[in-house]
Image: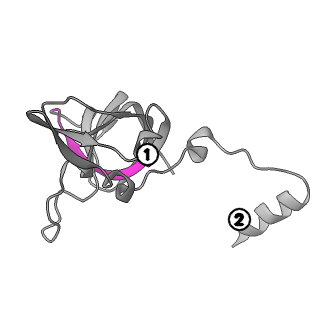
Amino acid sequence: MRSALCGIAAFLLGFHPVVSADERRPVVSWDTLAQVSVVRQQNRYVAQFTKEIVALESREVRLQGFMLPLDMGGKQKRFLLSAMPPSCPYCLPGGADQFVEVQAKRGVDYVTEPVVVSGRFVLVHDDTGGLLYRMTDAVIVHK
């Protein structure tokens, strides 16, 4: 309550809080990423992304999810970010639209609680592993 009153007072007095670049980046919802469809082209299936998803290509965005480590050890430089916690016994396993490969700038500590990751969003068109999305130069955003 006090911080809200201080913020209002500062605004009325002409002081505008400094907002970091990470706070201005859009937070992408998993519902948005789920709008992808798969279509058959010649002898293979390819992802067909909506205009909203295509608009995210190469942009700096934020995404909240759960870490799924791909490397051994406590520090992760490359991991999957999942919409659902990996330990949820009641959650159905997600499809490719529920995972984002994260390539971090430097190793980040593995945690089991949700994290917010900020990085450059990339659409993956020809990945044999079945991934549709990737974030590069990613960092964990601390609240």
Q: Residues within 10 Å of mark 1 (few under 14, many from 20)?
A: few
- Closer to the observer: label 1 or label 2? 1
Answer above or below: position of 112 versus 132.
below
Which residue in the structure is indicated by mark 1? 51
Answer above or below: position of 24 versus 31.
above
Q: Main secondary structure of the magenta part?
A: strand
Q: CA distance from mark 1 to mark 2?
A: 39 Å
Of label 1 and label 2, which has the lower sequence position? Answer: 2
Is residue 69 one of those drawn in magenta? yes
The x and y percentages for residue 51 are 43, 45
Q: Amino acid at mark 2?
A: Ser
Is residue 28 one of those drawn in magenta? no
Which span of residues is magenta-colored? 63-71
The x and y percentages for residue 133 are 30, 39
Q: Which quadrant of the view contains residue 129?
A: top left
What colouring does the structure picture have? one colour
Q: Which quadrant of the view contains residue 89?
A: bottom left
**Looking at the image, which residue is at 29% across and 56% down?**
83
The x and y percentages for residue 24 are 61, 45
In the picture, the quarter occupied by the N terminus is: bottom right
- Outermost residue, front side: 42
Answer above or below: position of 50 versus 113.
above
Describe the element under mark 1 as helix, strand or loop: helix
**Looking at the image, which residue is at 58% across and 47% down?**
23
Q: Amino acid at mark 1?
A: Lys
Describe the element under mark 2 as helix, strand or loop: helix
**Looking at the image, which residue is at 48% across and 51% down?**
27
Which residue in the structure is indicated by mark 2? 3
Q: Residues within 10 Å of mark 2 (few under 14, many from 20)?
A: few
- State left or right for residue 36 relative to residue 9: left
- State left or right for residue 15 relative to residue 40: right
